[in-house]
Amino acid sequence: MGSGSKWRKAKLALGLNMCLYVPEARDRDYSPSPSSPSSNSTTTATQPRLSDAVSLSPSGQATSPSSSAHRLSKSGNPKSSKRTCAICLTSIKLGHGHAIFTAECSHSFHFHCITSNVKHGNQICPVCRAKWKEVPFQNPASDLPPGRSRINGVGWSRDDAWMTILQQLPSPQLDMSRQVNSVFHAPEPNTFNDDEVLNLQDEVPENGNETTTETAENNCSRTIEVQTYPEVSAVPSAVSHNNFAILIHLKAPRGRHISCQNQMPVSQNSRAPVDLVTVLDVSGSMAGTKLALLKRAVGFVIQNLGPSDRLSVIAFSSTARRLFPLRRMTETGRQEALQAVNSLASNGGTNIAEGLKKGAKVLLDRQWKNPVGSIMLLSDGQDTYTVTGGGGANSRTDYKSLLPVSIHRDGGTGYQIPVHAFGFGADHDAASMHSISEISGGTFSFIEAEGVIQDAFAQCIGGLLSVVAQEVGVKIECVHPGLQITSIKAGSYQTSLMADGRTGSIDVGDLYAEEERDFLVTVDIPANVSSKEMSLLMVKCAFRNPITKEMVISDEPSEVKIQRPAMTGQPVVSIEVDRQRNRLRSAEAMAEARAAAEHGDLSNAVSLLESCRRALSETVSARACDKLCIALCAELKEMQERMASRRIYESSGRAYVLSGLSSHSWQRATARGDSTDSSSLVQAYQTPSMVDMVTRSQTMILGNRPPSQRKLRQAQSFPGRPQPR
């Protein structure tokens, strides 16, 4: 059998060039009806079958369905296709206000349904697979701006190692015992206040004093660890020292392990439940393998949410559509969510703003609130409806219109909704995705290799399912009367400094279990201090427990002191402080290099990165062979290589740099899946919960993926921090 025949079979198995379907959207009431198969234990044979999003057994093995939508469409009454549109599965009747298209193979469709199906180049009948010579429209690029071409979602080599995996993907299934409509045709309510009621046992009182003793012991006794490190331990009393650096190190408490959340309910004694909205690009460029792998990734997310977590899915192309309201991921909820995701089909343009507007509306309109709320956005293209400016160095201003003002960090709503954005492939708009995440307080990940979509999603939810502290705030006060704070370097975190320079603060937000944060504070130390010991700063930390809702204050304020002798020897610079200086210096160099590259000066961009590498090599950390310093140099070198030419920078360099900047500025793991890895570079921002979830992703569904395709590159590639001395 020729390779062409094999490729055609693989496409049929994936549902390429086919329209998939979703059960009728029950926007107002998502509980099964008495006649629904899911509500009757004796009708298991008619339970909805799952395909691309895959149904997983508790052991994590994929269960393959037994029949395909392709066979199903050809099995029943041969005349049924003439009475029913195979795209939306609604009746075709003359004189009912809908134009009808009849193909040369004699199958009929609503005109508006089939034009959407063929305008991206699809000329195959969804019913009999006959190749058409005449179609309603034959201009697949008519809706694209000048100079842009439609991405071929299935233009992979037929000899690619991925073909082995594609041939094993189960075929899409339909449950014909239930009425099925096109998801984009069902009506939506004006207000998304139809979210499923939370489990009563998981509701938390507004007054933290009402929590039980057991809950308090399990959740409130653990506080955020605060440590401080002065630049040097002693400064001569007769000498002043400007911009003296002090490191503030935070470490979140350990959370509960999340490996069994599907087997036991999430309660007050385990972890904070999540309200998650996924906003998914299903435009024409996502056709084929991309969409199939996206369904698998979302299926993995669904399977790993607990019964107290709630999920809603927004699909967008030229318009946006809510597939189902926020609902709990019980067994029934997961099955319905998987079936809805499996029904997605690709067509149309890319309207990111409309997708985010719907996603934000789901969270803002809800009647009930889980403690953690977040949006995950994935797109492989550029917004062609809202953005008018290019992705230059000032792209944050250009792309602000993509994000609803209601969920800006400075939107004034009092409720922050971080958007974790995932840019997919070489043609996505990295500048817009990075801006969306930055403005909302989320992270930006660059998915260069299609095969790591699921791993990237897994890492993200590994963090979201382990939030142990919210509204984390750090307060910094000068102790010595002659001291002033000159700067607080906290990346993208909001800081404030009083006019007199005596008090400052850092708004840290949420922390995942065992996450760490490092902030550098500089002060001006005066001369002629008479005492032999000088107190510089007092650092306090407070946060809200996401489960009990009560505020928790760190046990003891951390006081920073130095010695002020008359004479000192050669000062010994703190390796902890020097390490963070190197990290901040590298991030600044990356930002400057990116600005130069956006202005077309790639040679200057490369030079800036090289200068930073040389400067790092002369630091105390480098002389001590610090692993972080080595990793930073390696990261800067790779960025230089991705700025070697305009073509390389446009295809991957910009996204690579921006994902790194996002990771450094938030000190949070972001994925950069380029199917390569280096065993010598350990990821410092990645938490144990993230590692566990990524490991599960890599071993659960596509466990036989070729090793070269299994790697998830981190945008920061850092070794872990050493233990405090």
Image (cartoon, helix red, strand yellow):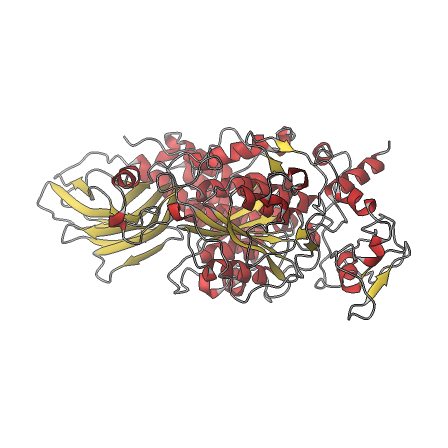
User: Is residue 25 among the parts visible in the rendering?
Assistant: yes
The quarter of the displayed image where residue 407 is located: bottom left
Single out the residue that lies furthest toward the left.
Answer: 530
Q: Is residue 108 visible?
A: no
Q: Quadrant of residue 140?
A: bottom right
Provide residue 155's location: percent of width, then percent of height. 75, 44
Q: Quadrant of the C terminus?
A: top left
Residue at image coords 24%, 39%: 232
Q: Where's residue 53, x and y in %?
A: 63, 42
- In the rendered image, residue 33, in percent from the top left (x then y), is placed at 59, 51
In this rendering, the answer to whether 81 lies above or below 716 is: below
Horizontal side of 310 relative to 126 (left or right) equals: left
Residue 227 falls in image quadrant? top left
Q: As displayed, is residue 142 above or below residue 425?
A: below
Compared with 95, 202 (above or below) is above
Closest to the observer: 283 or 721?
A: 283
How many labels sit on residues?
Answer: 0
- 380 left or right, relative to 501: right
Q: Nearer the viewer, residue 464 or 213?
A: 213
Q: How far across and how far down the image is residue 84, in percent?
A: 79, 57
The quadrant of the picture occupied by the N terminus is top right
